[in-house]
């Protein structure tokens, strides 16, 4: 295999990379040719499952009586935790397939009924009688830290976990990420202003429109096939193999097929409810079993975005320079943190934001609570902490009488600056992002409101995010030619809507000069497609893109080697153009790819040389390490790079009703290289709206018993077409990422990260009201404004 | 007790028997293999199951199958037999990301354009206001419908 010189690909003039080509899967979506898990047919043998859920946030399971359910005609089997005493988890094995001796959140799976049809399964599930002994529950992360708090995981000390987690057995602390850099006490002593406050962020739901769906089949020969709505087919296979090893299943016995997926946003990463279907399939060998999550289950028993209580203490000098930052983050990580603890970890590494701060103390604390498991959500914790940090930065600047944008320019991080964990900052276009965003929202210029009782506010905030992944997260690609020189690319990155398949086709098209219209990239099957860790962390354009770049380059080098061997050309004189091999210095000669990429090249003695051309590419960052000093976080290189940018907004707030209207939202993101600018703009429009919704109206409401009060789209409002900003201005900044394909780095999550702080700061600018608890609803604004009005006589 | 019903599905006469409590969505997806209407919430909130019943958009999860007796049903399968200007513009604008909401949105927009050849932006937003999309921020969809409105169907 050929190693690609990144420098060469960076400088290369491109024809396809950088073009806003049409999505290669566009027509599949627009004609309903695309098949999602629920659309697949399994014939009349298909069984359906329904899960029995805990109604309590914390309780001991005393006994389960399945007899009445088993007697319903059409019921095939009822299973409980006794049938599957198996643990699972991505970064920490703290979950069971079904609850064992206790339940830890409302909605947790206790048992399941498998029946001939879904309605019978649901009817029987209601007849499973579970006797519980209630235990005190803790729903708040700060309360969970108290000595007197009920202990959720007495066996924490025995849980397997990755080496970069630091659980504290005997407490509810599942992980505590510490960062210590410089001398914070000295930093605060040198400050002219110390500003400290606490910000609160509730839990949020992903709300992919496709619910989780999964079908499992353990065939008579012992082969387990899973069809899942998934961002992570290979990680799922691995977690299934680990959890189900006691049943004799290993990686080669398990096959995950991931058809089109109807949105992910992190919610379909890792393994949550999918483990249930995998287990159930083993209970009814020979028959496929289907488990579809309802919209309500989608809210209360998949990963949720974790809640956060963040205390920010910032020291600044009168000239606007930051002297110290102390950032303490208490995460409401829920009942199981097998994935969510890594969100906590990622934020701990990066909670300075894109600022140069010499003296840093960060404590990012992962707390078990009796709420549903937290987990990955677009932004991976960054949206949450940036609400507080960027609110705080603006407040500090205003207290000093410094323009908040000038303050940010002064303190922003630059290439080569030392990050909080000790490694150097990568090349970035943050300064350009700030300038262009400020220009887009006409920063500093007054605007006139549309009515006397309305006020205009503006803000500009910064953001950054690094992919959060194991240091050795790998991507790979196969590329094979067809007779007409069209191509199939096999990868296991998922197109969760972001356009991955199209971007991979563009990368291969650029190297092999085959048009995108002749390239097919499809959804994966772990038996056929090569390894991809997961489609998360905004890393697949970079990681999977590098693998495809290498596979295409490998194929090209095979082509040149064959032409040299068969026809005697010097391979260094060869190049590809318009689907042909050409030779420098011999403009009259060319050889179409379609003439030989399958059948080989015929030589003088009438024999053939060569054969099918197949490229192979593997990419893994070889410079990353997640291990560091547990007390300081110094010494590793946990993040491969950061993507940076700025977001600006203009809002109009009705001072009587508190209602906020977004007049203009601009977002500049340094993507390194926009392989498809149209898809980049699509991410910006979509991510911004998702972020604005979290600050303007969404949030999950739980009652005192830990029950989710709004598990549906009537009570948990997500934006409709009537709720979009009047104008969205996407700004693409391109400061090349040296090890990215054609200089690209990821940007999918980043588009929602700044939104909450953008809105909160602009609303404060418009009204003078500072809301430090998300969401910043019309109700909160109106009440705060009312409280300031003088009493009526 | 099963109820015999007859209807036109994507231009073809069909007659089937349904349970009294079968929804139109269940009949289409499970009974007839018409998979374009999707189950996103099963309570009329998300619009993913939108089909046209006698030219009017309905949420097929809220309509009983028996109510379709004597009606004309149009789903995305029926439209896609001869791709429309609307579909071409949606493709050209890279309007969809995951595409799960696409069938419902295409039908809502089809209904709008059949009634109003020159809708305003606000009318477009109103017409698709019942179709939830989590990926796109709606802007590229609205722009494609605007572009299609200016073309022959």
Image (cartoon, coloured by chain):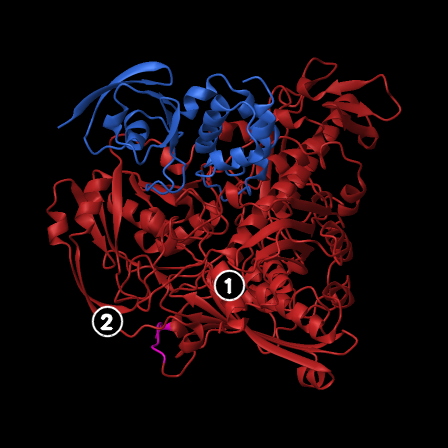
What residue is shown at x 30% (from left), y 24% (from top)?
A: B32
Q: Is residue A290 visible?
A: yes
**Could you say which is closer to the camera, residue A478 or residue A521?**
A521
List x then y, in percent, for residue A263. Answer: 48, 43
Label 1 with label 2: CB-CB less than 8 Å: no
- Magenta residues, as a range? A149-155
What residue is shown at x 62% (from left), y 30% (from top)?
A: A22
Chain letter, disc 2 residue: A
In the image, residue B3 lies in the stretch drawn in magenta: no
Which tint was used for chain B? blue
Q: Label the magenta part by its dominant secondary structure.
A: loop
Q: Which residue is mark 1?
A: A782
List x then y, in percent, for residue A457. Answer: 65, 59
Report whether B2 appears left or right of A239.
left
Q: Say which element carries label 1.
A: helix
Front: mark 1 or 2: 1
Q: Quadrant of the N terminus of chain A?
A: top right
Q: Which residue is mark 2?
A: A134
Which chain appears red? A
List x then y, in percent, for residue A564. Answer: 77, 27
């Amino acid at each position: 295999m050929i190693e690609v010189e990144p420098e060469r690909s960076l400088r290369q003039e491109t024809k396809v990379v950088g073009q806003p080509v049409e999505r290669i899967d566009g027509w599949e979506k627009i004609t309903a040719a695309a098949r999602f898990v629920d659309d697949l047919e399994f014939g009349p043998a298909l069984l359906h499952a329904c899960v029995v859920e805990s109604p309590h946030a914390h309780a001991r399971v005393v006994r389960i009586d399945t007899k009445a359910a088993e007697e319903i005609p059409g019921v095939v089997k009822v299973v409980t935790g006794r049938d599957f005493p198996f643990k699972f988890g991505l970064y920490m094995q703290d979950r069971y397939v079904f609850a064992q001796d206790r339940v830890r959140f409302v909605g947790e799976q206790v048992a399941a009924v498998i029946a001939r049809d879904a309605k019978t399964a649901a009817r029987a599930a209601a007849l499973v009688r579970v006797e519980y002994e209630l235990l005190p529950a803790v729903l708040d992360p700060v309360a969970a830290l108290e000595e007197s708090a009920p202990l959720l995981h007495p066996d924490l000390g025995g849980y397997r976990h990755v080496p970069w987690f630091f659980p504290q057995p005997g407490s509810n602390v599942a992980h505590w990420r510490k960062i210590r850099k410089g001398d914070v006490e000295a930093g605060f002593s040198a400050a002219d202003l110390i500003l400290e406050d606490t910000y609160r962020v509730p839990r949020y739901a992903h709300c992919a429109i496709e619910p989780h769906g999964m079908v499992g089949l353990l065939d008579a020969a012992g082969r387990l096939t899973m069809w899942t709505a998934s961002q992570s087919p290979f990680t799922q296979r691995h977690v299934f193999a680990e959890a189900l090893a006691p049943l004799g299943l290993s990686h080669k016995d398990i096959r995950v097929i991931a058809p089109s997926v109807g949105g992910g946003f992190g919610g379909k990463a890792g393994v949550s409810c999918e483990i249930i279907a995998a287990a159930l399939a083993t209970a009814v060998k020979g028959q496929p079993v289907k488990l579809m999550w309802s919209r309500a289950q989608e809210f209360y028993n998949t990963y949720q975005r974790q809640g956060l209580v963040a205390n920010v203490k910032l020291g600044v000098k009168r000239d606007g320079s930051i002297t110290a930052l102390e950032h303490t983050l208490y995460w409401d990580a829920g009942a199981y943190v097998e994935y969510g603890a890594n969100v906590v970890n990622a934020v701990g590494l990066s909670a300075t934001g894109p600022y140069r701060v010499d003296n840093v103390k960060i404590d990012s604390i992962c707390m078990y609570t009796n709420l549903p498991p937290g987990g990955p959500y677009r932004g991976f914790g960054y949206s949450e902490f940036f609400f507080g940090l960027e609110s705080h930065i603006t407040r500090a600047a205003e207290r000093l009488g410094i323009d908040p944008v000038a303050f940010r320019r002064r303190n922003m991080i630059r290439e080569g600056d030392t990050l909080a964990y000790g490694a150097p900052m990568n090349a970035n276009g943050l300064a350009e992002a700030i300038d262009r965003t400020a220009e887009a929202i006409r920063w500093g210029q007054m605007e006139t409101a549309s009515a006397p009782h309305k006020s205009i506010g503006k803000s500009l905030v910064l953001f950054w995010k690094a992919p959060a992944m194991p240091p050795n997260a790998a991507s790979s690609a196969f590329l094979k030619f067809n007779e007409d020189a069209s191509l199939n690319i096999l990868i296991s990155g998922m197109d969760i809507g972001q356009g991955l398949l199209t971007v991979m086709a563009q990368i291969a098209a650029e190297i092999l000069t085959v048009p995108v219209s002749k390239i097919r990239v499809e959804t994966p099957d772990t038996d056929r497609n090569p390894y991809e860790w997961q489609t998360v962390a905004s890393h697949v354009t970079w990681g999977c893109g590098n693998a495809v770049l290498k596979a295409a380059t490998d194929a090209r080098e095979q082509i040149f080697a064959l032409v040299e061997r068969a026809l005697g050309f010097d391979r260094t004189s060869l190049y590809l153009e318009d689907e042909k091999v050409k030779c420098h210095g011999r403009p009259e000669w060319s050889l179409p790819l379609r003439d030989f990429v399958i059948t080989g090249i015929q030589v003088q003695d009438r024999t053939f040389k060569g054969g099918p051309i197949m490229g192979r590419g593997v990419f893994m960052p070889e410079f990353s390490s997640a291990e560091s000093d547990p007390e300081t976080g110094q010494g590793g290189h946990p993040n491969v790079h950061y993507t940076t940018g700025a977001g600006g907004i203009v809002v109009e707030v009705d001072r009587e009703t508190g209602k906020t209207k977004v007049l203009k939202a601009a977002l500049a993101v340094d993507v390194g290289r926009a392989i498809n600018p149209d898809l980049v703009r699509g991410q910006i429009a979509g991510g911004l709206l998702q972020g604005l919704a979290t600050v303007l109206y969404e949030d999950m409401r739980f009652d005192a018993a830990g029950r989710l009060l709004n598990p549906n789209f009537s009570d948990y409002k997500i934006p409709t077409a009537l709720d979009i900003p009047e104008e969205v201005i996407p700004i693409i900044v391109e400061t090349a990422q040296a090890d990215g394909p054609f200089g690209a780095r990821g940007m999918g999550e980043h588009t929602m990260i700044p939104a909450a702080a953008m809105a909160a700061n602009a609303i404060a600018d418009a009204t003078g009201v500072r809301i430090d608890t998300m969401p910043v609803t019309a109700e909160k604004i109106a009440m705060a404004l009312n409280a300031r009005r003088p009493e009526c006589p | 007790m099963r109820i015999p019903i007859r209807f036109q599905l994507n231009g073809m006469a069909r007659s089937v028997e349904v349970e009294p409590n079968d929804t139109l969505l269940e009949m289409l997806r499970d009974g007839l293999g018409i998979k374009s209407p999707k189950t996103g919430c099963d309570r009329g909130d998300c619009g993913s199951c939108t089909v046209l019943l006698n030219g009017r958009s309905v949420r097929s999860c809220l309509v009983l199958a028996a109510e379709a007796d004597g009606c004309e049903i149009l789903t995305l399968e029926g439209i896609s037999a001869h791709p429309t200007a609307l579909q071409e513009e949606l493709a050209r604008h890279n309007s969809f990301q995951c595409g799960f909401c696409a069938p419902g949105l295409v039908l809502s927009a089809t209904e709008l354009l059949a009634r109003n050849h020159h809708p305003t932006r606000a009318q477009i937003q109103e017409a698709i206001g019942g179709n939830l999309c989590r990926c796109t921020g709606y802007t590229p969809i609205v722009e494609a419908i605007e572009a299609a409105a200016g073309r022959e169907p």
